[in-house]
Image (cartoon, rainbow, N blue to C red):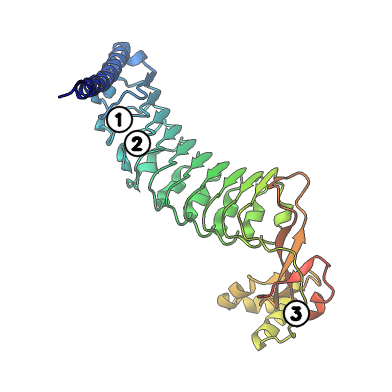
């Protein structure tokens, strides 16, 4: 064997030894920190074992009943110990960047928990009932996991103000999430979400909404009811037009680059005739009477809940302000973004949905209103 080969072997041996020494050193350090914490007993409030190459959560945690903060991020933990449930005074738990495959059931016993970090794991499921006991949870971070759905129980996190689910595999936002009345910040970037439920209108305290790089085709009209919304980022979706009233949102930041927005490129087209179905004619007649609060029609309509439900979906013409049921022609209104908005650089005009009930009204439209036609 030549000298060069011997040298390589020596280097490899030294490297392997140094790696082993590092692991051993980390474990020794972790054990020392844990021993120190155990000596403190009931007086120990904080335990930090960040990046100590731990593969198993220490069961001796049950001897620290008054622990407030437990930081175990950047380790190799694949399962929590049963003793975790005894830490009922814990307010912050950080298990980020480990090897967990689920949000474990033991967490539901941490009734004082306010901040929960589970980012950077391999979580693909949430154990049943986990959220039942977390009535004080304010912040939940589940970024960089493998979740495809959220349980209905997420609606029980009544105190939650911050929720982050970036870089998962979510396809829908459950309606129950929209019952989190204290939620002020919602991050759903880099998922596979197709649409936003109309129940989003119940997030009355939502201030920041991030939906970057999903598959969203349209925003519901109800998003315009979010009076406290200040930051909206929907970059990289497939949105072409925004709901009516969108321009009235009091945003401070709005980003929409990477969406195939309608552009103001008018061309002449054949004007569609005012051909209405018998149902539409009847609906417009009934709607006009309801607008006048006709007592006879108002009493009769109560006996036909299906008809009442259909009529409740009526729109108002943006020109004559009269109600109608079936859209005569899909129209777009191009408006300049508010000067108070911090926006994407290339955004000059915002295409907003508007409703026109007839050719007569369309002929009287604002010069920035156009019909949408297939090229």
Residue 154 location, x and y as percent? Answer: 43, 47
Q: Residues within 10 Å of mark 2 (few under 14, many from 20)?
A: many
Residue most extreme to the front: 2
Pointer 3: what residue? 269
Tell me which residue sits at (53%, 44%) in the image: 187
Image quadrant in which you'd find residue 317: bottom right
Q: Mark 2 sits on what residue?
A: 107
Specify the quadrant that holds the N terminus.
top left
x, y percent for residue 276 = 69, 85
- SS class of the residue under badge 3? loop
Vertical arrangement, residue 218 with respect to residue 15, above or below: below
Please name which of the two marks, 1 or 3, marks the residue nearer to the observer: 3
In the image: residue 144, left or right of residue 109: right
Q: Residue furthest left?
A: 1
237 vs 171, nearest the viewer: 237
Mark 2 and mark 1 in contact (Cβ < 8 Å)?
yes
x 46%, y 38%: residue: 140
């Amino acid at each position: 064997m030549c000298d060069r080969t011997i040298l390589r072997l020596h280097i490899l041996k030294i490297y392997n030894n140094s790696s082993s020494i590092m692991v051993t050193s980390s474990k020794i350090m972790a054990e020392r920190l844990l021993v120190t914490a155990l000596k403190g007993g009931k007086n120990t409030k904080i335990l930090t074992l960040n990046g100590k190459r731990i593969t198993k959560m220490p069961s001796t945690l049950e001897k620290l009943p008054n622990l407030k903060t437990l930081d175990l991020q950047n380790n190799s933990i694949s399962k929590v110990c049963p003793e975790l449930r005894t830490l009922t005074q814990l307010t912050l738990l950080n298990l980020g960047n480990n090897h967990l495959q689920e949000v474990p059931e033991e967490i539901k016993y941490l009734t004082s928990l306010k901040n929960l970090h589970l980012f950077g794991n391999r979580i693909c499921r949430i154990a049943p009932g986990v959220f039942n006991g977390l009535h004080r949870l304010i912040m939940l971070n589940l970024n960089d996991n493998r979740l495809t759905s959220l349980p209905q129980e997420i609606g029980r996190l009544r105190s939650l103000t911050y929720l982050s689910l970036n870089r998962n595999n979510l396809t829908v936002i459950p309606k129950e999430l929209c019952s989190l009345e204290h939620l002020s910040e919602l991050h759903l970037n880099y998922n596979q979400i197709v649409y936003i439920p109309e129940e989003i209108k119940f997030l009355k305290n939502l201030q920041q909404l991030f939906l970057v790089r999903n598959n969203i085709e349209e925003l519901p009209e109800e998003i315009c009811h979010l009076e406290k919304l200040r930051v909206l980022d929907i970059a990289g979706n497939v949105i072409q037009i925004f709901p009516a009233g969108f321009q009235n949102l009091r945003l401070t930041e709005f980003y929409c680059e990477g969406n195939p927005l309608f552009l103001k490129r008018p061309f002449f087209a054949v004007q569609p005739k005012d051909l209405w179905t018998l149902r539409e004619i009847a609906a417009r007649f009934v709607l006009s009477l309801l607008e006048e609060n006709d007592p006879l029609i108002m009493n009769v309509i109560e006996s036909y809940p299906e008809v009442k439900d259909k009529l409740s979906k009526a729109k108002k013409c943006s020109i004559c302000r009269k109600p109608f049921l079936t859209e005569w022609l899909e129209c777009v209104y191009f408006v300049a973004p508010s000067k108070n908005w911090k926006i994407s650089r290339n955004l000059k005009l915002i295409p907003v949905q508007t409703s026109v009930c007839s050719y007569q009204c369309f002929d009287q439209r604002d010069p920035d209103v156009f019909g949408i036609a297939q090229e």
